Amino acid sequence: AMCTALLPYLEKDLGGKPTKRLRMFVFAKRADYEAYCDASGLGSHKLAAGLADSGTFVTLVSAEGQSEETVRGIALHELTHLFQYGVTPTVMPSWYNEGFAETYGGEGTFTWDGTKLTAGGKMDAVYVHPLRDPKNFIPLKTLLAGDALKLINAQDGTARMFYNQSWAFFTYLRKHADDEIRVKFLRYELVCRGAALGAKAGEHHNRDASDAAAYFQTLFGSDLAAIETGFKAWLKTYESK
């Protein structure tokens, strides 16, 4: 019911909806989740808490050891990925994908009372404020080239910060940067989706986001230093309440 309630938010955001049925499996036992990943050729995703498989068009969630609220967030996050795959074959950079998915499944971005879902809110400040520390802040050039799956598999603690900063940067570009940057970012999203950048005919989503990444550099590369300065200034003023 909660995931069904998310669909209108995603349809409005992405300007369309998948023609395929959205499916989700929530595994009570981690071992079953990992066994499914192995059997499906998705063994590299075993350390993640969930995944969206565009090949079979199914979302998987591992619930063991997680709070109910965390499981809800994972489900919304992964469903957002799958919905996006169903709307456009474009292969977007990792920071964009995770920033977009955290918009609907991140800590504090949604509330569910058993009947009503409110989504697309602000991430809890406790997850954003650490980014103010230069030791935690990921330089934008590094963020733009980052790969969430590689960071998860590295198990060095950097993946969570990557997800949090991806949400923050995505949100900044969409809502809080100056008008010129916000309009340019909207153009970036629309062109990427419409041009199906990185898509390969007859294949489901691959991980080669070089085309969309190159287009981002074309639009923003010369302004990246100024954007980073503005982004850091916004982080200093961020409050979730």
Image (tube, rainbow, N blue to C red):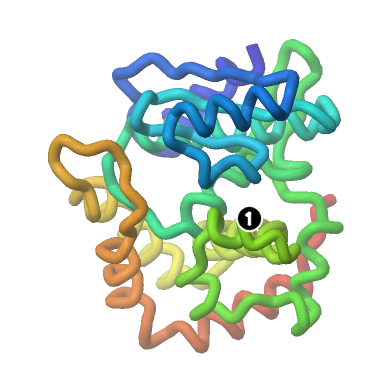
SS at mark 1 in the image: helix
Q: Is residue 107 left or right of residue 55?
A: right
Mark 1 nearby-residue class (10 Å; few <14, some 14–19, many ≥20):
many
| Percent x, y of residue 70 | 78, 34
Q: Nearer the viewer, residue 218 or 60?
A: 60
Q: Nearer the viewer, residue 38 or 168?
A: 38
Residue located 15% across and 35% down the image: 202
Quadrant assignment for the N terminus? top right
Q: Is residue 87 left or right of residue 172?
A: left
Residue located 54% across and 60% down the image: 150
| Percent x, y of residue 161 | 70, 63
Does 94 sit above or below residue 90?
below
Q: Is residue 87 left or right of residue 241?
A: left
Does 202 sit above or below residue 19?
below
Residue located 34% across and 30% down the image: 55
Q: Which residue is mark 1?
A: 152
Q: Nearer the viewer, residue 58 or 240?
A: 58
The single residue placed furthest to the left in the displayed view is: 201
Residue located 32% across and 33% down the image: 87
Query: Quadrant of the rendered structure where residue 65 is?
Result: top right
| Percent x, y of residue 148 | 55, 57
**Looking at numbered disc 1 in the image, what kind of residue is underneath it?**
Ile
